[in-house]
Amino acid sequence: MTFDWSYLFSLFKDTDFWWATWTVIRLSLLAWAISMVLGFGLALAKQSAKPVLRFLANLYIWFFRSLPLLVLLIFVYNMPQAIPSTSGVLSNPFYAGLIALVLSETAYMAEIHRSGLLSINKGQYEAGRALGLAYGGIQWKIIIPQAVRVALPGLANEYISIVKLTSLVSIVSLTEILLVGQRLYSENFLVMETMTAVAFYYILVVTVFDFLLKQLEKYLDVTRKKGRQVPSQWLELAQTPVAVVSPAATRGEVPALSARRLHKAYNNVEVLGAVDLSVNAGEVVSVIGPSGSGKTTLIRLLNGLEKLDQGEVKMNGESFIHLKQSGASLPVFTENTALRLNIGMVFQSFNLFPHLTVMDNLLLAPQYHHIGDKASRLHHACALLQKVGMLEHACKYPHQLSGGQQQRVAIARALMMRPQIMLFDEPTSALDPEKVNEVLGVIESLAQEGITMVIVTHEMNFAFGVSDRIVFMEKGRVVVDEAPGLLRQGSNARVADFLKDVTLAG
């Protein structure tokens, strides 16, 4: 029996096949989109700090990855026999197939999304939190755009799998590509010709959507993008200066920032023990000390990025972070979120959002918090970028900038919220030596403007030159808290030993 080519080519014009192909496209896209959304929620649940959510997520993933789709299809389609009220939906083969595919694919999508979430640096979460974004805002504005880009190859591959899995839905009599083929070859017995046509239609769907998904992947890949020219309007806006500090940050009797009896331990190893710190409005306090002395832990506790074990942090006399005791239960970490916008944070590793341009990095938090109108936010951003010498790079992405440039953008981003207090966690330690001075110059200019600052640094000359007070820490304790001039006199033997190899400028 010879291969009937004319019959094969006639099947490419068969309307039943094309309608079946449309059914496959609708079914696969809906199943892919719904399971992708549900899978992301499941991935978040699996990473949740709540044991109940983690258990339920793991149970779902284990069960539906273990259950063959064919078995699930038959079970869902016959569900009306046990629950008659479901017959209105499940008696329809399309909806029965869709529900079965979603139930099964959500488990696989969750693991793909989890891989994307695990690839996002912890600093991205912390930067969002430091800017006052809630959990949902961090996920939607920062994490999801980055995680989807990482997970997209896996998601695209899963879509191809779904397209092929739709052939199983023929078992519940859905008129899709395979069922049409089965009906035809049962009538004329031209199996090879008919199945060749079936293969063609499946390959066509996969090829088209694989191409489209690859284009989407390229579009989301910011490393392929080039920064555009800065609009002339922005250059004009930058000529008008704006205030970088909140008007509320005025000198007074109450400290702008105070910490009492701060304590932190990791795995029962004390890192910070009973530390007190008070910073007046307009004051610059530098925190120095050997590595492992607790400096970074202190500044992270001040901003609530780490949960304190004991103590309290106040801002302008108002409680910002404390532990709330309720009866005999363990103390609960409590934060006054209304005060978070009053404190800005600049990280050691910059923590810029890589999927956003420099300008978008600055505008994200003010837009989220609805601070000012669009025009005023843009004006403020342009003025700040001009101030830190980065306006000409406003349309670039972080990967197109040097380390020093990224840190200057990070400073401008923190200042966009007009904070009363600025925290710096070793802002120059990740920079090349030639880039250190450009960042220190920006910080020094802020100090001259009277912004309240707490700076963790290893740059001794900078600390002694710009600070009103210097706090020396060791082994999780404050050893000395004095003016730079007093420390220069070498009254404390431990500090003198720490500075013995440091040549301080006169």
Image (cartoon, rainbow, N blue to C red):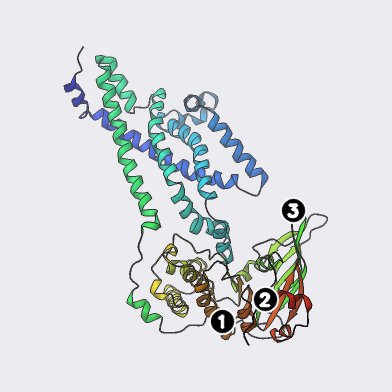
Q: Quadrant of the C terminus?
A: bottom right
- Residues tagged 3 and 1 counted as in contact (Cβ below 8 A): no
Q: Amino acid at mark 1?
A: Glu
Q: Amino acid at mark 2?
A: Asp
| Of pointers 3 and 2, the one earlier in the residue sequence | 3
Query: Which residue bears the numbered disc 3?
Result: 267
Q: Position of residue 193 (x, y in %)?
A: 24, 21
- Residue 2 in the image: above or below residue 147: above
Tag in front: 3 or 2? 2
Q: Position of residue 135 (x, y in %)?
A: 57, 57
Q: Position of residue 68 (x, y in %)?
A: 50, 26
Mark 3 vs mark 1, CA separation in Å: 38 Å
| Of pointers 3 and 1, the one earlier in the residue sequence | 3
Question: Secondary structure beneath disc 3?
Answer: loop
User: Which of the numbered marks, if any, corresponds to residue 444?
Assistant: 1
How many dots with numbers? 3
Mark 3 vs mark 2, CA separation in Å: 34 Å
Q: Amino acid at mark 3?
A: Asn
Question: Secondary structure beneath disc 2?
Answer: loop
Q: Position of residue 301 (x, y in %)?
A: 68, 66
x 61%, y 36%: residue:
59
- Toward the front, the furthest residue is 501
Towards the viewer: 144 or 289: 289
Towards the viewer: 18 or 94: 18
User: Which of the numbered marks, if any, corresponds to residue 501?
Assistant: 2
- Toward the left, the furthest residue is 6
- Residues tagged 1 and 2 counted as in contact (Cβ below 8 A): no
| Of pointers 1 and 2, the one earlier in the residue sequence | 1
x 21%, y 29%: residue:
12
